Amino acid sequence: RNGIDADLDILRFAAYLAECLPFNIGSNIKWLDLPGTVEEFACLLTLQLDFRSEAEHLKRFNSNFADDDSVLFPQLINGYDAQGDILVETYCEGMPVASFARQHATSSPELCAKLCQTGVKTICKMIFDHNFIHGDLHPGNVLICPRTNKFILLDAGMVTEYDDSDHQRIVSILTSFIRMDGRRAGELMISDARMRTEEGSTYVSGSDCVILNEEAYIDKIEALTIKAMGPDFFLEHLGTYISYICNAASTHHVMMNPAFISAALAVKVQEGIALALDPKVEVWRIANPIILQTEFRRSFRKFWDRLIAGIFNTFPGNGNG
């Protein structure tokens, strides 16, 4: 743990130095909010160092997907309480998604298409419905059981959860990306950046907050969304996707939201899994019902809260005289 703390301090120092680089390099880098990104990574990594946190995450994931028999998380073993450096859980047998797809793409296309839908729905539920996202969705942690054809998600030590305001903004932006509406995504990212810089940023102030050529930035995000429709892009160029967004943010002075990066990676991994199983899939068609349900619930909850507040304020002594 001490070694990791030291490594995080080095990352913090490196983020600070990066923003001090000459020839306008540092002034452009600051729009990526590297210090904020390092702190977000530090929070995620700190959680992973304590297996008791992972045990709590597994309980919550299993509860969230208790009614979904197509997704499997390891279960905690009764009588073996998690310790800081010990976690006893069930063994889940599975194979990588890409390997499963290669074996079954020709012989069982219907099965692959069904699993494709399961994968998309699972990640969408985490992001849009549960607001509790697996933070380490690399291919080694996403398997398929060859016997039961269930999705298996391992290594739940890192999770992402947002407060209500951040979750609303992230959901709106990701919804636009999933629906391949790059212009709307760009507009929302500009709105998010402007709001956060106006609220007061440690790294950006004064005239520096002015976004340069908003229309050109939106055009770049739209162009990226169109390019990303190709099946090979998701699987082989995930890093390029994020780099492109970051470069556009630096060029046009659009302050990146660190929370968006982690959620965007989850979406891209989701799409990569889906396309590996079914290259013809239209992810937005699967995701849209979940997004609409979430939007309806959030709108209804806001309406209900306003209604209750209005009723409460009509009583004497509650603000209306």
Image: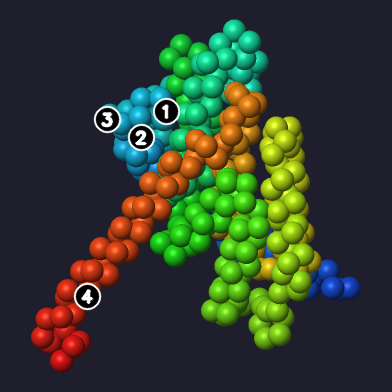
Indicate the position of residue 87 as horizontal and vertical percent values: 41, 34
Q: Given this view, does label 2 or label 3 mark the residue nearer the observer?
A: 2
* Image point (22%, 75%), residue name: 310
Label 3: few (<14), some (14–19) or many (≥20) C-alpha neighbours in 10 Å: few
Query: Which one is earlier in the sequence, the residue at label 3 or at label 1?
Result: 1
Q: Residue at x 49, y 40 (%)?
A: 287
Residue under label 2: 65
Q: Residue at label 1?
A: 71
Whether tag 1 and tag 2 are in contact, CB under 8 A, the answer is: yes
Task: Pick the residue in front: 266 or 19.
Answer: 266
Q: Is residue 108 above or below residue 181?
A: above
Q: What whole-number distance in Å separates the C-alpha atoms at marks 1 and 2?
A: 7 Å
x and y percentages locating residue 228 in the rendered image: 71, 42
- The numbered mark, 1 or 2, whose residue comes first in the sequence reads 2
Element under label 3? loop
Residue that label 3 marks = 79
Q: Amino acid at mark 1?
A: Val
Which quarter of the figure has residue 234?
Answer: top right
Q: Secondary structure at mark 1?
A: strand
Q: Earlier in the sequence, mark 4 or mark 2?
A: 2
In contact (CB < 8 Å): disc 3 and disc 4: no
